[in-house]
Image (tube, grey):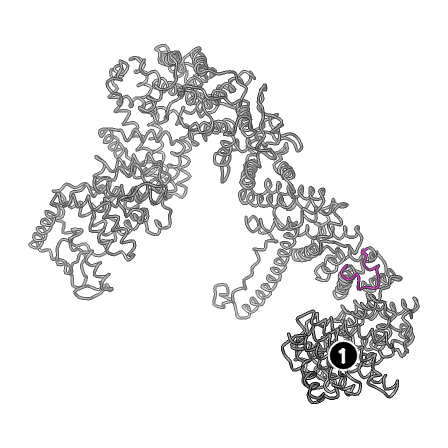
Amino acid sequence: MKIPASIVLGSFQEKDPTCHSSMWNMLLFFTGKFPEAWRAAPLQKVILPRLWCFLRRGCYGSQQASYPCLLPMLSSMPPGTISAEQFFIDFFRSLWEGNSMCLHSLADRVALFRAMKECFMWIVNNASRYVEDGLCSIENFRVRLIECIIFKLLWYDYITKGKSYINNGALVDKDGALATKSIQTTAQNIQVKPLPNYPKSFMQELGNYIIEILSSISTLDPSLLHAFSDQFQIESLKIIQLSGDGASLECNQHMDQLSEFFSLLGTRLMDKGENWPLVYLARPFAAKSFPLIKSMGSPPAVTLLSIIISFFGPSVLPLESFVNKGGESHVQFHTSYNQECQPEVLLQFFKNNLVKWCLCMYDYSTSSRLDLLLAFLEDAYFQSQWDWIFGCAAEVENESVEEDVKTLSSDRITLLATLMEKVRYKFIDKKVLKKSRGMLGFEAKNWYSMRLDAVAVAIARRNTLKNPSCVQFLRCVLGGAEEDPVLLISKEAARLVIEELLKHLTSALMESPIAWTKYASSLILPNGIEDCLQTNKASLDETLQIANFSAQVLDGSLFCLKVLDDNFEIVPHILAAPIFLDWETRMSYKSGLSSSSLDLWEIDDEAFDKIDIGSAHYQGKSTDEISIDQADEGTAHDNAQEQDDIRLGFVKSVQALRSRITYFCKSFSLSSLNRLRWVLIETIRCAVFQEDVCEAQKIVLMCIEWVMEVMDHTCRDQDEEQQMLDHLLFLSDDCPSWAKPPALGESKLSTLKSINVPSEADKNMHTRFVMFVERIGLALGKDKLLFGSLTKTSHITMENTSNPIRNEISSCRIWLAVEVLCTWKWPGGSAVEYLLPFLCECAKKDPGHPQQIMVNSIINILFTGALTNSALDNFYPLNAWPISAEEVDKIEEPFLRALVMLLAVLFKDGSVWTKPDASRLLHYFQKKEFQNVSTVNNFTRIIPHILQILVPILRKRTVNLEENNQDFPLAELDTGNMQKNTCQWLQRGLSGPPLILCQMGQPDIEEWVRVAVSCFPLRSVGGMETLMMASAANISTQERELLLALFQKQASQEAISGYHALAAERRASLATVSNGDIRWEQARELSLARLMAVAIGYCWQEFGEHEWVFVLAQLRKWLESVVGHMEELAEGIHDATRVEVDHTIEYVEKVVNGSRDFPMDLAETTVFVFSLLFGFHNLDGAEMTSSLNFLKAVNWERAEIRAFEDILRLFFATGLAESIASSSCSGKAAGAVIALSRQRDVRFWENVAAIVLCAPSRAREAAMRAADLWGLRKGGINALYAILFSVHPISSLQWAAYNFLSTDPVQPFGVTKEVLSSQSEESTAENGEADQTTDMDSSSEEPSFVRVELHSVLQTPPSDLLKSHLTADNRVRYLLGWSLFLTRLQAVPSLSAARERMVQYIQDFGSPSTLLDFLFQHIPLKQSSSPGLKKKGNAAVIEATSAATAARQSAATNSLSFAVEALWPIGIEEMATLAGAVYGLMLRVLPTYVRDWFTSLRDRSAASSIEAFTTAWCSPQLLADEFSQNGAIAEAVHIWKRNIDREFEGVEECPICYSIIHTTNHGLPRLACKTCKHKFHSACLYKWFSTSHKSTCPLCQTPF
């Protein structure tokens, strides 16, 4: 038996867990059959050591298979085979040490704990098997097992978290010391910070299994629990003693574990209803520990006691003993659980002992004492106990606590805050509901107290609300930190607290100097409070501090507002206050509107600089004075830093609160949300209309941000968004408006009921409103702004109605579109850019679509407004096609201006509306003429502007009419409708006297003539194109005849005689001519000029000699008037800038403004008439008629030359005016005034430029002479440069000026100031000894022969060019300047002195390398290196193609004119074209400079690309020209000959290159060394300096 027993029982050495199940089956079967095997085997030497090792190793991983087999194994052992006590201690110790292998597996841990419990209880129950000496021995055996296994092994491991174990029956720590000693010694070494070995879940399971074992023991024999209880109390008291001040971290962990153990006991008590935890553990421990805990005051110990009380109730303490004996207890406890103390004893102990101790002071243990105090609350006495606690904590005796609260110390407020925090998070928290004895504490209403309400309101009202504890207290009583808010005070008290917080926040808001903040404060404060706040105003810092803490209170209590949401208006107001404060701060920072005290960004975070005694600030002060100043400034710095901290903290609190409010704003009730939105929108409206107008743009941008925030956070659907926009955009009766908006709640159709024109005083406000509207449209989208909630798919039927407006579009804000259009321009925007493109898209919709109908409605309102409010408008445009925005700007009447521009955009190129639309509109406008008799005169004033747009469309010849859409209620139209209307209007013009005989009181005839003339469209450019367009127009014979008759009536002898008679009569009467008479005369002359232009365009073939005489006479008269006006302007500028004064610009502006009375429209028409007459030159012989023969017969050729001269005088006069102004002390700023004045009449100057380009050489020479002989400070060349390099250029004038300067007869003296013949140049060069004596300094002087204007442009700093964009004005001027210079250089003979001087200029001043670098900024190299370029969609490829083609053409033709002419309108491609052309010409005229620049390039990639570009596009033509002539050889021979000639004349060669004449620039050695007197070429000397890296003379080595 010994051998098989040893084999079977010794199988514990098997380490493979897969074999353990079979191992246990074999072992249990074998020992069950042969129990004597335990005696036969070597148990102590072999079997048990292997078993202990097996258990300590966690069964080698087979826990779930092995642990259930331990109990059957123990039961199979015969009683006499083992030494019971020691065996079981070793057994459980080994088994427990194996727990390290089970920590991470729940199933393994469950198997371990179950095996421990089952084995231990089996041994206790079967103790008689191992002890035979009677009951006493059995009892002792059991007690010994409980002490060693349950207490010293399991419980100690639980307390120490795995840092102790049993060694031979003694409890020791891992290092071999006794556990109790370890606890003591560890307390002395607080530096030890052991980490727990067991996870938290394991410790909780261990505690529960200890309690289950104890519970099983109590069931078996309750008296056995004394073995655990006695040791438990002894060790626990030791732990408490070590937990005082200075306790180590390990001791505190022991206290935590002890508290957790009592929590588990309390849960066991509540769940199972067992009383042994109270009788044997809690009550004895509490009685013995309470005096110790009270005397020590250790927070962990007090927390432990509060946990015991919270689970086991106050009866766990012998309160009678404490009340009678002052706290010492020697009571012997009984086993009865129902031992309750008397109510009066409990309350007496609670009030007289416990409350006084717990609330005696505020220190580190206050929190745990408050936990203990609240744990004593019993349901039966809850209200009485709570009132007593709060009354003592707040030190108040009744509800009138205002004065008491004022005297509360900071510690007392902190105590209150901590108390209420305990109440909220430990009693209101539903998560602890199952762990508490009482139920009343879980309902918030049970905590309500009159004293609590009063204290909360009083603290909120304190003007010293600066203590963080006040914030903590109010946040606790209000709640709202979570989404399930619970108030600890009544709703009324909460409302009062919130109202006080609102007052504090609003007080801070009212400190701001920004205007809208005062209005916002009045909206959210209760009535009468605002004056009270102003009366009791505190200092700024104190106000901000209180507001800061108020914001913090609100930030932690936001959800409590939901409780008050339905009953109080205070909720939306308190939500609005932080938003206002945030807006104020952002506005102060972003717009810089004020030095707001609330502005975070004004806080100076930088430390003051150290004081320098020698600085200017301290000069003249003694050392003592400086020390005093230093002290004062140090104090000031501290105060400033404190103020900065206050403001910084306040702004941060506001921003945090603001972000939280917007997060859940939409969760409030509809009424609160509506009120909040109303308050916010009212404030935004106030900010838009009432702030400083100078900062309007910044304010509007800020307000738009606010609008978007309000919409995002307060609007829950589209309907609410539209209601918000209605409120936001509503204009009351006292606000300016063009189309009166509807009242809130009314249909948008009410906009058509009344049209109001704002006064001048209101226009600033109105402009700001439109800026605001623009930004809203950009942010929301114009469709959402103008159409509201209108669906885009709905259609409207227009049948059987005369009004295009339908109820279905009542949500459209038509009036708003009218407001924007009538305002026209505002800072940063205009109706043309903002609204018209959108309206065009709307007009493209299908017939009947609401958006299209809205456009028609806008036209209806605009026409009605113009018809009702129009006055005599000075601007009467020529029928140009298309119309420009500059021309529309001259229309002063807002409705008419908007209507004309809208129609011009809609009919532009026929892309939106076409001929049928124009016909219907005309019919609609005609019907409006007869609807109101009082508006007939206004109709004649506005209809020409409209006809200007519609007539060119209607005059087009078309085959079929397009399908009509029913935008307006019109009858069937035919192609003769326009002709019929025109004839009627012409007949009305014929019904009266001639225009020149009309008196001022008879304006009807003149106006009807204007209407009739508007029916005949003409192009603005004049010339042959206009004549051809007129011949192609759909004009009937009757219209032509009536038009001719109307003109002949003006040119009749009767009209001319009558006019002369009236003029003589006025001169004889010596009557003073009034301004009204002058304006009437100008309007009459303008109408006559328009009529003449139209008559020439459409009826010139029927003109006779009389008509042409009249035309030429009027043309001469008007041209003289225009020329006289422009020359007077130039002379006025000359006089105004003659004296150098500081107010030159003001004088220039005064002269320009004084000239505005002249009718430039008449001047424009006059030049246009001449362009028509000049267009007859382009007619071939077949088109010549007898009418033109009549024209020639009346001396047209002479009149033509005089007209050219007059128009050239206009051209030079404006250039001289700008040149003279620019040369004044104010410089280009004064010249810009003249240039801007031309921008108002762009079309006039374009016609002037077109005629200038066509002017013959004789006229040009005469005009140049006249300009030079005028006697002004500047001459003709100056005028041309002023126009070419104008600050505000007009492209056509620039081209005309360039053409003048680059062609004969001006070119020879257009670039240089002198013109030298070849002979004179040679003579000067040969005899110019003065030139040879020029020293080094002369090279830096400004050249005397290059025009100053051109020189200043060529010398533009490279940095200025590089900083500007590719189409900047300075880049354009730079290219034009070099184009002129190179063109002139190309024209000068190659061997002339003039060429030499120009080349020398380039070397000294021109910086060709800068020019070449500049050119290749505009030429895309990578795309232009291939000769096979084709234009593609890529912009760079297009630019490269243009540049390459231009380079090849200029190299072939030696000309740049083609590229300059194509420069306008200026674009990137056009600039590339001119750059390429300049490069090509440089290769032709300056090849050496190009080569030198190329060889100096360091960028190999760029050099390679430039070489490829030149080879591909320029070299072929250059090589062909080089091979076809031998000019270069002749030039070399000529240079050699001149060198020889100079040698014999005594001129020394340059010591560097050994030549007299430089091979590149042909210059002489002029730069002389002041020491050795040798002379050098400047280019050679420069190269010497740059290559030798020194600036010494090459010969004598002295510094040059």
Question: What is the total number of numbered labels drawn onto the structure image?
Answer: 1
Q: Is residue 932 above or below residue 818?
A: above
Q: Residue 190, how many percent across, how many down?
A: 68, 80
Out of 334 and 470, give the one closest to the viewer.
334
Give the labeled residue for mark 1.
Answer: 239
Q: Main secondary structure of the magenta part?
A: helix
Reply above or below: 640 against 526.
below
Q: Any magenta on residue 695?
A: no
Whole-percent x, y for residue 343 in the image: 92, 66
Residue 1349 shows in this picture: no
Q: Would residue 1143 be found to the left or right of residue 5 on screen?
A: left
Three-letter residue code for mark 1: Ile
In the picture, residue 988 is in which quadrant?
top left
Instruction: Please state the extent of the stretch shown in magenta in the rendering.
Output: 430-444
- Indicate the quadrant containing the C terminus: top left, top right, bottom left or bottom right: bottom left
Q: Is residue 1067 left or right of residue 572?
A: left
Q: Residue at x 30, y 21 (%)?
A: 1173
Q: Residue furthest left?
A: 1544
